[in-house]
Image (tube, rainbow, N blue to C red):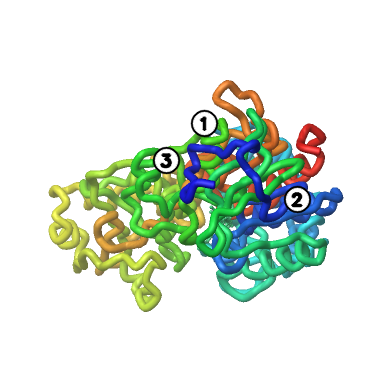
Amino acid sequence: MPKKSSSDQPRALADINEWYAQCDVLILGGGGAGMCAAIEAADAGASVIVLEAASDAGGSTAMAGGLIYMGGGTPTQQACGFDDDIEEMYKYLLMASGPNADESKVRLYCDSTLEHYTWLTEQGVTFKPEYYAGKHTNTPNCAGLMITGNEEAWPYNQHSVAAPRGHKPLIKGDHGGIPLMENLIRRATEKGVSIRCDARALTSIMDGRRVCGLIARIDGHECAFLARRGVVLCGGGFIMNDDMVARYAPRLVRGNYPNGNPNDTGAGIRIGLGAGGAAINMHEGFICTPFYPPGEFLEAMIVDGNGQRFINEDVYHGRMGSAILDRPDQRYYLIIDSRHFDVLNRPPNGGYPVAGTGDTIEELETELKIPAGGLCNTLQQYNRFAAEGKDPLFHKAEKYLTPLDQPPYAAYDLSIDAGGYFAVMTFGGLDTLTTGEVLTIERNTVPGLYAAGRNSAGLPRCAEGYASGMSIGDATFFGRLAGRSAAANTQGLT
Ligand SMILES: Cc1cc2nc3c(=O)[nH]c(=O)nc-3n(C[C@H](O)[C@H](O)[C@H](O)COP(=O)(O)OP(=O)(O)OC[C@H]3O[C@@H](n4cnc5c(N)ncnc54)[C@H](O)[C@@H]3O)c2cc1C
């Protein structure tokens, strides 16, 4: 066997003379998608090996806030007093997935949302039946339910009825990924899944067009793993691969915080491409700038370097981040008046510096070097409409429309180069069917190859529409389907 395998050079089955291990279903990556695939494949009677490059399973899913997007009247929603409707969830998620939405995935995901909730609870995941009503990036307490996207914000609120659908596995604060992965890993292990850590998959093994195994590096040696029924690629996104980000998702280069684990290098995507798969939606990703909490800052005005508003300020932080990133040469300021000064000892989550202060708005305008009148006129117009509870230009919800008429004023600098937080992660990946089967550029399936989570292009498809919970929801649900499909593949090796 050559010393160094490369993802674009699959190894031929005929050249393998020694197997390190054999199984029915071989999974690359022990994160959310991989562990759900493993559990389902094992439940279908398959022997399963998970190859995990890190020294422990968990991946970015374990690092995550753990929010999972589910609705349609889950027991947690009902216990918190919320009605929800699968059709409303579908309308919302389809819009949230943007112009590149995969309608068939959105449809199946919504139709299966109650079943998926039940399945997760059967694996031991629990959600505290408590609703967190504040505007936050995750529930700061143990509450298991909150609104995690743009459901209440214009224009989404024009197209579907809002409901809280972000479900956090039980834990205090922003660490829901830990209990989620602890339960999934424990359940997979109980079912006999073999998790091989410190095993980095390098390339596929192919029998003609069929994928029938992987080469992985273990203790410095290249080892061949045979997969009799299928290989499932669940290696996460590629935000830690600077070269891939620059080539495929250059917009994300301007983010200053790669949101992921060190193995988010796109290895699974590259192995899938090497085996004949196609990748889609590679330019898209999540761009978060958490200008809240504190929730009071939704009452602020956010303006550009000309003092002009450009978006309703009550949007999800990912939509705000995307809007800022789209206009590269601008500066951005969050403008508050003295009524919000009491929250200054809790500055915005994103760590933005104070850009200026002024006893009057004119003074602040000068200090920010905004062209004369730009900010003053905007504030005057904003306050006039806010007093009437209206925002005819950008449609901010009435509950956040408080005139900013109590000087002095202050501004936070939300510009990308000012030191604030712009977290980015990728959404592009292998083109798959809802079954997880990987597609070629001609949309034929690659026999024996499946993908899920951020190795695939799933539900999360655009920065402007993303809501927290869509990625883990997608990874866990479509990971399950991919594991099930691989286990059911009767066309594999016998
Ligand atoms: C801090 C943070 C907070 C987040 N919060 C949320 C949230 O609340 N809700 C939400 O929906 N999303 C959230 N996300 C995003 C979400 O966690 C991920 O997009 C999602 O969990 C990806 O799941 P996955 O199974 O595809 O990948 P992962 O969970 O990352 O699993 C991939 C696994 O593959 C392994 N791997 C990679 N390459 C190889 C290789 N060559 N060989 C073997 N193994 C390999 C990795 O080590 C990893 O364990 C958050 C992300 C971060 C970083």
- Image position of 137 (left or right of 74): left
**Kind of residue at badge 3:** Pro
Give SS at disc 3: loop
The location of residue 118, given as percent across then percent down, is 81, 56
Identify the residue under disc 3: 392
Frontmost residue, 23 versus 360:
23
Whichever of callouts 2 and 1 sits on the residue coming sooner in the sequence is 2
Identify the residue under disc 2: 23
Q: How many marks?
A: 3
Frontmost residue, 119 versus 297:
119
Frontmost residue, 189 versus 350:
189
**Kind of residue at badge 1:** Pro
Give SS at disc 2: strand
The location of residue 249, given as percent across then percent down, is 39, 41
**C-alpha span from label 2 to label 1:** 40 Å
Q: Residue furthest top?
A: 442
Tell me which residue sits at (45%, 54%) in the image.
317
The location of residue 446, given as percent across then percent down, is 64, 30
